[in-house]
Image: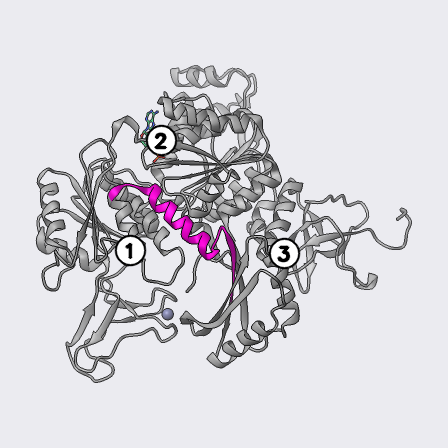
Amino acid sequence: MTKDSPVARTVPVLVPMPAERPYSYAVPDGMEVEPGSIVRVPLGPREVGAVVWDGPGEAVDPRKLRPISLVFDCPPLTEETRRFVDWVAAYTLTPPGLVARMLLRVPAAFDPEPPVEGLEYAGHEPDRLTPARRRVLELAGDGMAWTRSGLAHAAGVSSSVVDGLSAQGVFRPVMLPPRPIVAPPDPDYAAPELTADQAAAAAELTGSVERGGYSATLIDGVTGSGKTETYFEAIAAALRAGRQVLILMPEIALTQAFLDRFHDRFGAKPAEWHSDVPPRGRERVWRQVAEGAVRVVAGARSALFLPFRELGLIVVDEEHDTAYKQEDRVFYNARDMAVVRGHIGDFPVILASATPSVETRVNADRGRYRRVALPARFAGAALPDIATIDMRRHPPARGGFLSPVLLSRMKDTLARGEQSLLFLNRRGYAPLTLCRVCGHRFQCPDCSAWLVEHRFRGQLVCHHCGHHEPRPEACPECGALDHLVACGPGIERIAEEVVGHFPDARTIVLSSDLVGGTKRLRLELEAIAKGEADIVVGTQLVAKGHNFPNMTLVGVVDADLGLANGDPRAAERTFQLLSQVTGRAGRTGKKSHGLIQTFQPAHPVMQALASGDAETFYAREIAERERAGMPPFGRLAAFVVSAATRHEAEGYARELRRAAPDMAGVEVLGPAEAPLSLLAGRHRFRLLLHGERRANMQDFIRALLAAAPRPRGSVRVQVDIDPQSFL
Ligand code: ADP
Ligand code: ZN
């Protein structure tokens, strides 16, 4: 196209909408754009932030072609980032525009941060020199620019001293670049002394960083063996090589202790990225990641979609954690996509876990991933002694849920001045409320789920959609007064039982329901770590990553809870969760115990936990998966069809089934009504696709969707590649 061509130059632009392809826009004369440029474009009646893409754009009638409104003063997204977006979109069968939207979520960061007002020495002497003024001048006299408060703070004087000097013309105002959100980490700030095992593991990890290029390494070792300590060395190596680092963590908002540890090692904190970071903070992190000022981010799964410019290492901590799977709009598993990002960017990825996912274990066993093992806890801290309590032989007292065996161990622990943790993965007081007179059960009006009583709040709550109503005095069905009974335990009820047995102990209940949110939770966790509680009753929130030095007993109230839910990973999940929970005990060398209440003490999960023989458990689980062709030996994908009526949902699910192409190696199971058949007022059906490892599920699904009629009316379809949830 020549300069005086009548046709405007056009570029493809990916808009943050469910667009299958970039749209074409005209580039006005004099505007410079390149692939990755962040721009503002008109879209219908609005203007949106979008990215200049590569490849062909959608063909448009030249008369309808609209111009790009402006190019933001922002570093363009790298080629690597763009290929990552394309890859995630193709793999998850999501329109690329929706994936790009995850990257473009903070439009306020597209403009540079405003400069900060500062001052510098102008060369004049003040009229008189007090000791305070002298200290200020000693610092600022070399001509470096300072902020007013920074200078006052450094000189140990009040800001008015600095103001006084400014008023006399000793300083002149200057504009400073915006302050970095975190100081740069120093890879050599405080290198630890590693044990021989740790040093060997660290050498493997740093080696993969120093050699460069893609690799995926599993670091596998019991809780407290020093995995964190070891991968910090790989982070140091990446920093020395001038690369940015991303650490993904499942519960980053609660891991204050991790940030402090990072600070101890690197002399500065990592930038945080998660939903509790306020909007302004997020804008700054996004911007400074794009500019390269932020070198290390510790974040939740969505941090994978930050605009890194020289990412050189991703660490996925607790890689087995289910929190890495997003099941909303873009269905993706951040652990798997981290490996993809490493592959595209040609840099190493480290997966850390004491209880790796079966998928990752198999990848390591078959040489697709490397494996580095840390066999023992640091400093000889012993793992807790784990035993099961057979609830058929040691039943709790009537109306209770804690067996005498567990209660007596709690009593001993209390007497020694040590802490106990009771774990139950169920919030609230009781999972079911019914009327003793007519048998009425309280159900969510919008979901096929019972309402969970939250006694402290006086509410019945749906844990699926959030519906809540006050707990009535009378049965709404038969009107009987005071005949409602709570069935089964939640943590509030366990806490009530604990207080009944140990009225003088300091008991804390911890779950995500805590009034005061994350901040309050952090405080409570710190209080527990400092020993300000004797007995903690909590959900899996307390299981993740915390270090409670005085905790020597962990009791699992209902170990069978997660086993009977039709999830092919139920055994694996239960093993991981309970290992992690019992791993809270004995982190500092005191003799410690884990007691697991179960009705199935012979179950392989309970056997593995009690014997500490994880290898046998993994071997059995892997053999089972291989026999059934389940992941990673086969592939799964799910369709969830939902609609306003059951009839519509079922009808469309059947149409999808009929549209399935003939492809060797893929079978379609269902449709079947989903276990959660009604969710937030929508009726749900599921189809499960089961493919051989080699099968191209994406091609199959694309062909299926192309052959199926478009969804009509209220019908919606979600595609979930590698589903983790089967509800
Ligand atoms: P993991 O990540 O495997 O659970 P951590 O790295 O958190 O293990 O280590 C457990 C505890 O032991 C931490 O408190 C850590 O500071 C300490 N620790 C581990 N290795 C060392 C070491 N080489 N020197 C000093 N402290 C260590
Ligand atoms: Zn509901």
For the question of whether residue 186 can be seen, the reply is no
Name the mark on residue 97. 3
Residue 563 appears at what percent x and percent y? 31, 58
Q: Residue at x 84, y 53 (%)?
A: 8
SS for callout 1: loop
Question: Is the CB atom of the residue marked by disc 2 within 8 angstroms of ligand 1's nearest atom?
Answer: yes
Lower sequence index among marks 1 and 3: 3
Which contiguous range is marked in magenta? 611-639
* Magenta region includes residue 636: yes
Give the residue number, with chain letter if any, for mark 2. Answer: 226
* Magenta region includes residue 629: yes
* Number of other residues with Cα within 10 Å of mark 2, as a class: few under 14, some 14 to 19, many 20 or more: many
For badge 2, the amino acid type reads Gly
Would you say 179 lies left or right of 195 here? right
Q: Residue at x 42, y 24 (%)?
A: 200
Circles 3, 2 touching at the beta carbon (< 8 Å): no
Residue 654 appears at what percent x and percent y? 54, 76
Would you say 515 lies left or right of 121 here? left
Q: CA distance from mark 3 to mark 2?
A: 41 Å
Q: CA distance from mark 1 to mark 2?
A: 27 Å
Q: Quadrant of ligand 1?
A: top left
For badge 1, the amino acid type reads Asn
Lower sequence index among marks 3 and 2: 3
SS for callout 3: helix
Give the residue number, with chain letter if any, for mark 1. Answer: 425
Q: How is the image coloured?
A: one colour
Residue 616 appears at what percent x and percent y? 34, 44
Question: Is the CB atom of the residue marked by disc 3 within 8 angstroms of ligand 2's nearest atom?
Answer: no
Q: CA distance from mark 1 to mark 3?
A: 37 Å
